[in-house]
Amino acid sequence: MAAFVLAPLAMPTVHNEIKNKMNLAQSLLLLLALAPVLAHAVDPGITECAAVRDNPSRLACFDRLAAQHLANEPAQPAAASVTATDVTAANEPAPAKHIPTALSEHWELMSGDKRGTFGFRPHGSNYLMATYTRPPNDAPYESLRHVFPDGRLSHAELSYQLSFKMKVLEQPADRPVDIWFAYTQKSFWQAANGKASSPFRETNYEPEIMAVMPIDASLLGFKARFLNIGMAHQSNGQTSTLSRSWNRIYAQVGAERGNFSLLARVWRRLGEEAAQDDNPDITDFLGHGDLQGSYRLGGHEFSALLRHNHSTGKGARQLAWTFPVAHKLKGYVQFFNGYGQSLIDYKHTLNSVGMGVLMSY
């Protein structure tokens, strides 16, 4: 009976032992399969440090391991430092946008208008027009009956003006001034005078040199833009009784108010020897200065030129209207009354009206 009783008790024990051994074998097989992965995932140094039994020594081992790990980490880019200058620059308002005006563009007054040196630019108006003059100034040509029959001129002419300027120095020695050279040529052509072989009656040549300085001042609602100090020579290239010429120095101020521009100029004639002076009384008729104004309305421009000598009562008035035609070509209408439309006419008063075309820019 005893043997019979013990046998059933022994069977579960044997069964459990066999089951435990199988579980152990499976665990070993699993460890062997995961060994390559664990070898990469677990730093061998960690195992070594974990095997140290002494607590202080184990902590020291882990500290050394951490230091080695930090030393092997790739360097991270340093964060950009923000300086007080950067903060100030970020808080500063953006510079004001440059808004060109008619005068600032014409004389390149602001830094945004500068175009460098030795570039050709318009100075005065460049036009070609047919004119009718009443009465023409016949007196200078009475001695040239072989050219002008009976010394008479045709009332109808073609008149043109070419005018350009060139900057020769831009802010020399960092001074706020530009040096310009300008040239203007105005011609009067008796194109309708076939009896006299259609000659050019008069041509005036005027080279100038000027120093232009930008200014910033307010006067009567106008904004003064520039001061111009210049010297001009004007002559007609003729000899004997037809010769006319003079030299002058001048100062000119340019101002603006919206679409209205105003140029005021005063001059002083440079003296000449009496024997070489072809027109000693020229300032009696052309005065000592002029005033020019222009108003722009869309593509149209209305302009006026005034001269007056208060001591003699002599002077001149010129009105002009420019209107769009095509691209840079514009229509041009001009009316003149008074003295000095040309040098040969400096002391002859006349009325002239003309119409033609003008090249704009």
Image: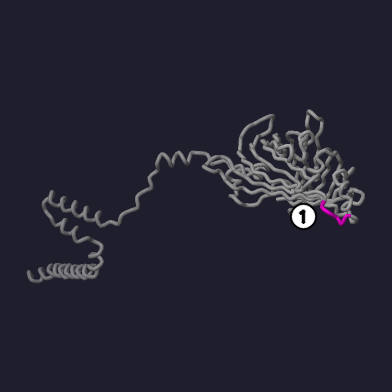
Q: Is residue 59 inside the magenta stretch?
A: no
Q: Is residue 197 magenta?
A: yes
The residue tagged 1 is 326
The image quadrant that residue 212 belongs to is top right
Write down the region rendered in magenta: 196-200
**Can residue 328 be seen?**
yes
Residue at 80%, 42% (x, y): give it: 341
Task: Indicate whether 194 appears above or below 29.
Answer: above
Name which residue lies at 19% across and 61% down: 44
- Classified by dominant secondary structure, the portion drawn in magenta counts as loop
Q: Residue at x 62, y 52 (%)?
A: 119
Furthest residue toward top: 311
> In this view of the protein, which residue sits in the foreground, 80 or 260?
260
Residue 318 visible in the current orientation: no
Query: Which residue is painted at 85% across and 50% down in the image?
Result: 157
Splitting the image into 4 quarters, where does residue 313 fall? Answer: top right
Eyeballing the image, is 90 above or below 361?
above
Location of residue 27 in the rendering, given as x and y in whole percent from the top left corner: 21, 67
